[in-house]
Amino acid sequence: MSFRLANRAGEAVLLDGGDYWGLGVDPMDALTRNDELHHRWANRGTPDGQVSPADLGPPVPDPKQVFAYGLNYRDHVEEMDEVDYLGRTTSEAPVVFTKFPDCLVGPGAPVKLVGDQCDYECELVAVMGAESRDVDQAQAWDRVAGLMIGQDISDRALQVAATPPQFNLGKSRESFGPTGPALVSPDLVDNPDDLAISCRINGEVRQSSRTSYLMRPVAEIVSYLSAILTLHPGDLIFTGTPGGVGHAQGLYLKPGDVILSEIEGLGALENSCI
Ligand code: ZN
């Protein structure tokens, strides 16, 4: 089932490079129509026009649930623990929080900084394509509609303001969830479990890893979550960020900074900070 699905002014479109093909339906409807998308992708013919990533909205604009899996790359666990010695490296229980869906924005949207401890986290985002409950790992990928790039922008000060810390609000400020540019079906990447992932700030490489270093890969997270609750079509799972975040280096985002997030086969997101 091949497709690259994007959101052009609220309409689902197929996207190939800068070319688009309008589908005449809402993006949330489109992602449940795998067979139709595949057929349209295979027979897409002459494009309807051209679009730049900056003109696109989030590929999945209105998910019912957005999960974010924390501390899923070992180098990130270690760098965060060096800041405050909270013993994260000894925790075996998954760290899962939410980004409230209203924080989602498109691939070229500005990130609106608040305070002086906002941080970047480039992440692989898996999008559910089917209602899923008690899915075992072997079947998990069949329930995933596609993959996209996400930025789990984080207000570190707000993230730890309460005792015990509650991540959800510090990860959900307005514009703190850039995603896109397109939702890419898993068959269109070489190996969905091993993709190069990187983040540059003003051209400087801050994060560079591979998704094969995920301690809990996509199938395991889908299985874990679906054992607790029902996953719905369009639900997003941010899978965690590799080492190199600003918090570990005292390098927080500043107005004017340009965040370039890239994942092999999924394209790039470029978001400016204001
Ligand atoms: Zn994150």
Image: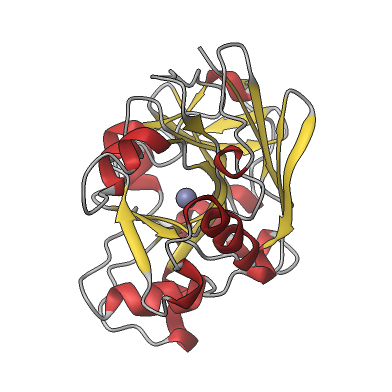
Query: Farthest right residue?
Result: 204
Q: Position of residue 50 (x, y in %)?
A: 66, 20
Indicate the quadrant where residue 10 lies. top left
Taking the view exactly as shown, the residue that stands out farthest to the front is 85
Residue 217 position (above or below residue 245): below
Give the x, y percent position of residue 180: 54, 38
Q: Position of residue 63 (x, y in %)?
A: 29, 46
Q: Position of residue 58 (x, y in %)?
A: 44, 34
At a point 42% along the width and 73% down the height, the residue shown is: 221
Tell me the quarter of the picture where residue 67 sits.
bottom left
At x 49%, y 62%, the residue is 71
The colouring scheme, among rainbow, by chain, secondary structure or one colour, is secondary structure
Q: How many marks?
A: 0
Residue 194 is left or right of residue 38, and the answer is: right
Residue that appears at 56% across and 41% down: 182
Q: Nearer the viewer, residue 141 or 32?
A: 141
Q: Which of the pair 266/11 is nearer the observer?
A: 266
Residue 15 in sight here = yes
Residue 2 appears in the rendering = no
| Residue at left offset 34%, top offset 62% | 96
Nearer-the-camera pick, 200 or 184 = 200
